Image (cartoon, rainbow, N blue to C red):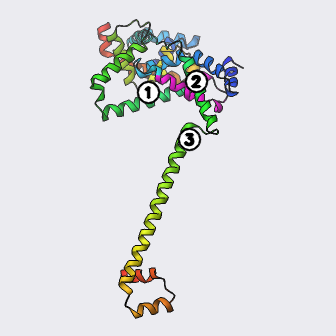
């Protein structure tokens, strides 16, 4: 039995200290998945908190036949997708993001959680994150797992519940799409 | 092998996810295909840039904060006889809705019935034939009212 499974058994038996340990173990991975998927560090804290609350609520239904990472990954991605949808709707329905209060809140949020060791300038980071945002969700997910999380093909296949062959072709298609989106950026680089 | 398959092979080669024979195949394709050589270079650059996005750090107190909030939720659940707060709120809302609907329906029924009687009395008060119909044909006032209205 893995360490994760031992903790999950303890949580299912009502041990809150075990839950805190599990959160501590995965908080960094979850936060970075949210950061890259959402394209900014705003709200990482809030969404991560929601992820772990949902994890806690769903733990009684956890099946011990899959890795905990792939399970928490799916919960995280589903929440990010929900959040992106909500933001799109809010953006259409409201112009609140232009008010001074909203700008002030945005500045405070940025102070709260910031990428610690980014090697890119703000402008370059925005170009890359914006391109990742515009990718098809299935392409963005697989590139985040491969390039950012550095997972091997078999781990990606397990996490996304697809075959190895599908992983290979999807990674190629994702790279091709990102290459097209960044074509101007590449011209400047070369 | 068509070019699309070679491109997928080259992409897998970049990730080190090929066996020895696939590796040899990828290398020999790269020697003759400038498009795939450029693809590899750009894919490497994309990887560097994605990795260079950096990482975010949550506060040290994050885990304790989340654990505290779920602990609080659990306590509330016990206080409410094992009912989840969200389920409890839904239940209260539904119960309120049912009560409001019940009162509205009974108010409408009472008002409707009183209005029917008033109308029937006005239409039928002086009619002998109506009295006979009511007594002999075993009709209700509502049946009679319906007949008058549809006529």
Disc on the earlier residue, 2 or 1: 2
User: Disc 3 to disc 1, how far (Cα)?
Assistant: 32 Å
Q: Which residue is mark 2?
A: A70
- Whether residue B151 is visible to the viewer of this picture, yes or no, is no
Is residue A62 on the magenta stretch?
Answer: yes
Q: Which residue is mark 3?
A: B87
Residue drawn at (36%, 84%) of the image: B123
Using the image, name the chain to which the residue with label 2 belongs.
Answer: A
The label number, if any, that marks residue A79 in the structure image? none
Task: Write down the residue under mark 1.
Answer: A137
Q: CA distance from mark 2 to mark 1?
A: 17 Å
Q: What span is colored magenta in the figure?
A: A46-72
Relative depth, front residue between A1 and B70:
B70
Disc 2 or disc 1, which is closer to the eye? 2
Badge 3 and badge 1 both on one subunit: no
Image position, residue A117 (x, y; %) = 44, 6
Q: Give the mark toward the camera: 3 or 2.
A: 3
Q: Assign a secondary structure to mark 2.
A: helix
The residue mark sitting in front, 3 or 1, is 3
| Picture quarter with the C terminus of chain A | top left
Pointer 3: residues within 10 angstroms few (<14), some, or many (20+)?
A: few
Q: Chain of mark 3?
A: B
Q: Is residue A1 left or right of residue B118?
A: right
Q: Secondary structure at mark 1?
A: helix
Separation of disc 3 and disc 2 at Cα?
28 Å
Mark 1, chain letter? A
């Amino acid at each position: 039995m893995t360490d994760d499974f031992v903790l999950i058994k303890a949580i299912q038996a009502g041990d809150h200290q075990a839950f805190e340990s599990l959160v501590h173990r995965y908080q960094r991975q979850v936060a970075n998945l949210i950061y890259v998927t959402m394209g900014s560090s705003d709200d990482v804290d809030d969404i991560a908190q929601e992820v772990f609350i949902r994890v806690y609520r769903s733990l009684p239904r956890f099946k011990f036949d899959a890795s905990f990472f792939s399970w928490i990954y799916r919960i995280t991605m589903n929440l990010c997708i929900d959040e992106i949808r909500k933001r799109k709707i809010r953006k259409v329905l409201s112009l609140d993001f232009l008010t001074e209060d909203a700008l002030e809140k945005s500045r405070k949020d940025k102070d709260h959680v910031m990428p610690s060791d980014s090697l890119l300038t703000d402008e370059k980071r925005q170009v890359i994150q914006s391109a990742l945002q515009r990718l098809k969700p299935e392409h963005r997910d697989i590139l985040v797992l491969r390039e950012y999380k550095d997972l091997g093909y078999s781990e990606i296949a397990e996490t996304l519940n697809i075959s190895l062959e599908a992983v290979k072709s999807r990674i190629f298609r994702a790279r091709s799409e990102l290459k097209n989106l960044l074509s101007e950026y590449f011209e400047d680089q070369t | 092998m068509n070019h699309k398959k070679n491109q997928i092979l080259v992409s897998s080669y970049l990730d080190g996810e090929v066996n020895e024979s696939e590796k040899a195949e990828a290398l020999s394709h790269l020697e003759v295909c400038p498009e795939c050589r450029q693809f590899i270079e750009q894919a490497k650059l994309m990887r560097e840039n994605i990795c260079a996005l950096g990482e975010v750090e949550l506060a040290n107190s994050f885990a304790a904060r989340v654990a505290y909030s779920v602990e609080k939720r659990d306590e509330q659940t016990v206080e409410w006889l094992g009912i989840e707060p969200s389920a409890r709120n839904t239940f209260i809302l539904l119960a309120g809705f049912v009560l409001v609907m019940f009162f509205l329906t009974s108010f409408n029924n009472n008002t409707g019935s009183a209005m029917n009687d008033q109308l029937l009395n006005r239409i039928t008060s002086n009619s002998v034939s109506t009295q006979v119909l009511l007594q002999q044909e075993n009709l209700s006032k509502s049946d009679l009212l319906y007949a008058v209205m549809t006529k």
